[in-house]
Structure formats: C-alpha cells, structure tokens
C-alpha cells in the first residue's frame, strides 16, 4: 500500500512538472536552461571579502556579511542581495541573466558607495563564470584620467564553499592584477 501511495505522488509530481514546462514560452526556454548553470547559488551564504590595495602583495579583510541568492522574473534572473545593511562596509546587489541572442551571460552590479551600475559580460569557462566590464565601459575613475575595469571569476562548484575572485585592470584589459577575493560558505 505504501508503494502505491509513493507511486501516485511521483506520478502527480511528474505531471505537474511537465505542465509547468509546457507553460513556459518557447522564447524563455534557452535562457532558463542557461540560468540553470547558476541554480546551485540559490540560498543564503555567509560572505567574507578580502581586498588587496597592492596587486595581491597584501590583503585586508572586510567585515563579514550574509547574502541571499534567489531567482526572479520567472526564473530568468538570479539576484544576490545582502541580508542586512552595514554602513561600515562596501555592499552591492547583483543581478545575473543570460542573453540568448548574443549567447552571453550579463551581470549588473549596483553598489552603495559609488552608485555606478556596473555591467559585465562573459561566459562559463570550465567551472567558472568569467565576465568583464570591458565591453560596457562601466569603469571606475581612479585619478589622472585612469579608469579601472574589472574581471569577475565566479566559482560554480562546491556545495558549501565557493570563491569569487575579482581582478582589476587600469590599462583596458592589457594586464590584470588581483583586487578582491570573496569566500561564500553555507
């Protein structure tokens, strides 16, 4: 009897899943599939960020934080937000999406210090999502006509710990230096 009940529940679940897929517009299927590569990020993560002011020679640890990743816009956008405001720390909100027409992931980052909406583009390379803001030109002025760009390397593996590495460039991507390292743990 118990096996019959389990079989009935599984059958109902499969029918609901099939109907849910049938309700997805064709135009949404490619980006939904691409976004599934980022699905393991969903949930709450403890975040520890380190900053290098000298190209990786030394590192300064910033205050810890808690972030939550969740899907929005019918699963087409993954968002990351801090769970509490920390006036003594640099914080940002991030939105991930996939542009099926240009076959690229796009990330928008909004921070609470400069207020620049930084736009990154890139793709999955091995087990990382690698993006830069070189194409968008959403650089940060650092003085004397020098504008800083960034490369994001986001680990897509690990169930309980992930690394997010940020390199900087002050010469339009000709050279890259370590700038931030973010460790996410569940």
Image (cartoon, helix red, strand yellow):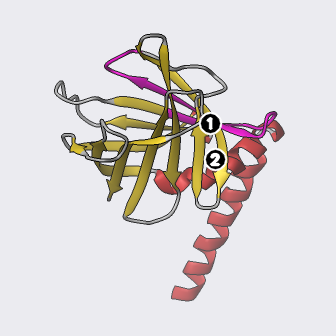
Residue 162, above or below 30? below
The C terminus, quarter of image: bottom left
Give whichever of discs 1 and 2 has the lower sequence position: 2
Camera-nearest residue between 169 and 152: 169
Camera-nearest residue between 113 and 100: 113
How many marks overall? 2
Residue 140, above or below 178? above
State the image coordinates of residue 177 (x, y, percent, origin top left). Answer: 45, 41
Q: Quick one: SS at disc 1?
A: strand
Residue 86, above or below 160? above
Q: Quick one: SS at disc 2?
A: helix
Q: Is residue 98 magenta?
A: yes
Q: Residue 50 vs residue 25: left or right? A: left
Q: CA distance from mark 1 to mark 2?
A: 7 Å
User: In the rendered structure, which segment of residues is drawn in magenta?
Assistant: 95-115
Res. 1 visible in picture: no
Tell me, yes or no, whether the two marked residues, 1 and 2, touch with CB atoms within 8 Å: yes
Residue 108, above or below 114? below
x 53%, y 39%: residue = 151
Camera-nearest residue between 62 and 27: 62
Q: Is residue 122 magenta?
A: no
State the image coordinates of residue 18 (x, y, percent, origin top left). Answer: 73, 57
The residue under label 1 is 97
In the picture, residue 166 is in which quadrant? Answer: top left
State the image coordinates of residue 67 (x, y, percent, origin top left). Answer: 33, 42
The residue under label 2 is 35
In the rendering, which numbered label is found on residue 5?
A: none
State the image coordinates of residue 97 (x, y, percent, origin top left). Answer: 62, 36
| Residue farthest top in this picture | 144
Q: Does the magenta stretch mainly form a helix, a strand or a loop?
A: strand
x 59%, y 35%: residue = 132
Count residues near mark 1 (Cα–Cα under 10 Å), then give few for <14, some for 14-19, many for 20+: many
């Amino acid at each position: 009897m118990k096996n019959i009940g389990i079989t009935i529940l599984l059958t109902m679940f499969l029918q609901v899943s099939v109907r849910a897929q049938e309700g997805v517009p064709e135009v949404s299927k490619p980006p939904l599939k691409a976004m599934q590569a980022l699905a393991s990020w969903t949930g709450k993560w403890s975040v520890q960020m380190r900053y290098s002011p000298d190209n990786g020679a030394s590192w300064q640890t910033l205050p810890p934080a808690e972030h939550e990743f969740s899907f929005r816009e019918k699963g087409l956008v993954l968002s990351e937000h801090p769970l509490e405001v920390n006036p003594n720390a640099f914080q940002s909100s991030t939105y991930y999406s996939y542009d099926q027409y240009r076959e690229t992931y796009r990330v928008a980052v909004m921070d609470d210090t400069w207020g620049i909406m930084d736009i990154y583009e890139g793709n999955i390379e091995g087990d990382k999502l690698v993006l830069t803001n070189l194409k968008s030109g959403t650089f940060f002025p650092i003085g004397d006509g020098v504008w800083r760009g960034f490369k994001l390397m986001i680990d897509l593996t690990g169930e309980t710990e992930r690394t997010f590495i940020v390199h900087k460039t002050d010469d339009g991507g000709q050279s890259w230096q370590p700038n931030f390292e973010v460790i996410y743990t569940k």
